[in-house]
Image (cartoon, helix red, strand yellow):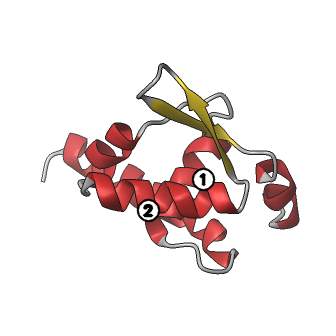
């Protein structure tokens, strides 16, 4: 296996391990934990359903379901790009929850 591939696999494994801390939140799935990790790494991140589809190779319905679960906990907030397209940013409770998890 070449070094570039080994580095990629190691990076992906490290991302999963770092996201696992968010799994301590009740009823959070692995994708949602990885979404939260994205905001931990980049607090100004703006994501879309399409971003999540591409990143996790899931359907729009699955991506939206993951987002809705995080919106209901105030871990994400919704913003409007225009009349149709929506984006999602770090929510009101994100920092509080991260502090409680000692991140």
Identify which residue, 4 or 84, lies in the foreground. Answer: 84
For label 1, the residue is: 36
Q: Secondary structure at mark 2?
A: helix
Identify which residue, 73 or 13, lies in the foreground. Answer: 73
Label 1: few (<14), some (14–19) or many (≥20) C-alpha neighbours in 10 Å: many
Identify which residue, 57 or 20, lies in the foreground. Answer: 57
Residue displayed at 73% across by 45% down: 91
Left or right relative to 54: residue 39: right
Instruction: Name above or below for residue 31 compared with residue 5.
Output: below
Residue displayed at 15% across by 46% down: 2
Q: Among all residues in the image, which is located at the extreme top?
A: 82
For label 2, the residue is: 65
If the image is split into quadrants, where does the C terminus sit? bottom right
Circles 2 and 1 in contact, beta carbons < 8 Å: no
Counting residues from the N terminus, which is met first, the one under dot 2 or under dot 1?
1
If the image is split into quadrants, where does the N terminus sit? bottom left
Label 2: few (<14), some (14–19) or many (≥20) C-alpha neighbours in 10 Å: some
Residue displayed at 80% across by 46% down: 92
Say if residue 53 shows up in the picture: yes
Estimate the x, y position of residue 77 in percent, counting from the top left. 66, 42
How many discs mark residues in the rendered view?
A: 2
Instruction: Name above or below for residue 63 compared with residue 50.
Output: below
Instruction: Name above or below for residue 66 compared with residue 53.
Output: below
Instruction: Name above or below for residue 19 compared with residue 20.
Output: above
Estimate the x, y position of residue 94 in percent, counting from the top left. 76, 51
Residue displayed at 47% across by 61% down: 66
Say if residue 34 shows up in the picture: no
Q: Quadrant of residue 80?
A: top right
Estimate the x, y position of residue 6 in percent, counting from the top left. 26, 51
């Amino acid at each position: 296996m070449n070094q570039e591939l080994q580095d990629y696999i190691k990076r992906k494994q490290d991302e999963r391990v770092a996201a696992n801390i968010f799994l301590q939140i009740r009823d959070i799935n692995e994708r949602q934990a990885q979404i939260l990790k994205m905001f931990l790494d980049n607090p100004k991140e703006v994501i879309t359903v399409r971003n999540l589809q591409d990143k996790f190779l899931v359907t729009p319905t699955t991506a939206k379901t993951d987002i809705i679960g995080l919106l209901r906990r105030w871990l994400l907030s919704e913003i409007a790009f225009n009349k149709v397209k929506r984006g999602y940013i770090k929510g009101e409770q994100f920092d509080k929850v991260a502090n409680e998890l000692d991140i």
